[in-house]
Image: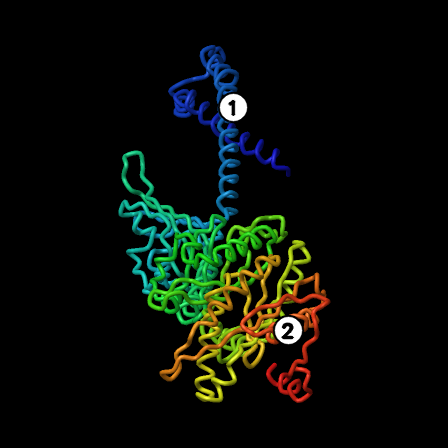
Amino acid sequence: MSQKQITQYKIGGKFLIILALLLIGQFADRLVGLAVGEVRWSGSEWPVLFDLIYVLFIVAPVVLVFLKQIQGHLKELEKKEAFMENIFENMYEGVSVVDKQGNLTKKNQIISDYIDLDYKHYIPFKEWTSYVTYLDPQSEVSIEPEQLPLIRALRGEKVQDQQLYVMSKNGVTKYLSVNAKCLRDDKDNIVGAVSVARDITKQKQIEQALAETNRKYEIIANNMSDLIAMIDKRGQITYASPSHETVLGYPQEMFETKEALNFVHPDDLDVMQHLYDEILFTGKMKEAEYRVKHKNQGWVWIEVLGSPISQSDHQQSTIIPDEILLISREITERKKLEEQLKQMAYYDELTDLPNRKLLDMHLKKAMARTNRTGESLASMFIDLDGFKEVNDKLGHNSGDELLKIVAARFVSCLREEDFVSRYGGDEFVVILENVADEGAKEAADRIIEHLSKPISLKDEEVVVSPSIGISHYPDDSEEMEELLSKADQAMYYAKSKGKNTYQFYHDDLPKVQSITNNPIVKVINQFKK
């Protein structure tokens, strides 16, 4: 039998029952009278016939239509109830309803999955509250049944996002976020409560993992000696690690929200600005060394590695990064050691003037610069006349002191851009860039004037005088060794003329027998290098 036939059968049965009741009600008095003999059927009872026709043809159809309408409404209600039940059961969140005594009267399957509780249409208060242990996620303290969201709602409270950690007897555990509200009748009396629970277990696990990661990073940041900083595209520091206070003496808060370049040595501003620009526009890591202010130690050297940080997943260099990560470490001691090694490798230990190795490096670069500018370069080879006598008479210590004083006088009488080097023994070399003959003459005159002044050593006044030979690049030679050799040749010619003078090299310059041509002296000079 089809559903339609069943429905028609139900309507027909109800109609016949109602019709029978109508007939009985309409003719009950007559039927009783006939039964007891008080009324006799005469065969011409028109009122009875009329009543029968009225019931069968007027009342009965109205009742039938009414029954069909009721049946249609009931069927529609059943559809709506089934639809709502389907929605209720298929919601992504768990819904629970309790009566005013706290008994669970309705819940969807999601709640059963959350707490692993067998589905029942009615679960007493004590049963559903005792089957699951409810804990506060923060304190992990058990929550009493009276403080559960549904029960709080029965007291008229509006519960929003109360978090619960639930553990069922079967071992199922969940983190839930619950909203609950009371239900009222038309007289505003509380008749129950409804709650909506959302599973936040994955969210909590992510939060816990993130918190653990942050805890580890915080331990690392608080105990590391490296400096970690983040700066945005405007150059402001958005984060500075606690190690800033340990390394630089200033509190961590002093750096955050400040301009990063505010802490950089003025001479290193271009270095750091170039570093930031390169990272922002190339999207690649860059390294640099710069100085930063220390609270108690002045300027200290920092080695930094800068990396681009982008909020998006795109890593193309065409996308300007949102921030720059700076990982730095203090290298002041290393820089001091480097300077000491550099001093030992490139500077004369006695006079602190550049040695022959640094002279070679400087002269090569100076010659290259001269080629680009087209200007002239002068090299001076200088020998101190009278130094050997002072050294023999007053001793080596006095000779060393004399050389220190002479070195200081060289520095004081030359331009800042001029280069002076101790070539060996009492010989010095001066390199003058962008000077013609007149400029070289003026420099030679200043050297002779300053170096010829008396010097006090051991309560005695001694005098040394320079003999200076001058050659020009590239006019006299384009080779470095030959250029110095020709200046040396001119120096010996000046010495032969009476010392305390200077001489320019030229091709017609007479050759003067130099002690430096002695093979033994050449070997000694090699050791001086």
Q: Identify the mark at residue 493; answer none if there is no mark.
A: 2
The reply, left or right, for residue 306 in relation to residue 369 is left
Q: Quadrant of the C terminus?
A: bottom right
Question: Of 485 and 230, which appears nearest the observer?
Answer: 485
The amino acid pointed to by label 1 is: Leu
In space, the residues marked 2 and 1 are separated at their CA atoms by 146 Å
Q: Secondary structure at mark 1?
A: helix
In contact (CB < 8 Å): disc 2 and disc 1? no
Q: Is residue 115 visible?
A: no
Q: How far across and how far down the image is residue 478, in percent?
A: 72, 65
Q: Quadrant of residue 141?
A: bottom left
Q: Secondary structure at mark 2?
A: helix
Q: Is residue 228 visible?
A: yes
- How crowded is the residue under tag 1: few (<14 C-alpha within 10 Å), some, or many (20+)? some
Q: How far across and how far down the image is residue 511, in percent?
A: 70, 75
Q: How many marks?
A: 2
- Image height check: is 66 above or below 86? above
Q: Identify the mark at residue 380; answer none if there is no mark.
A: none
Question: Of 491 and 291, which appears nearest the observer?
Answer: 491
Question: Of 314 and 282, which appears nearest the observer?
Answer: 282
* Mark 1, residue position: 64
The reply, left or right, for residue 187 in relation to residue 98 is left
Which residue occupies 33% across, 41% down?
183
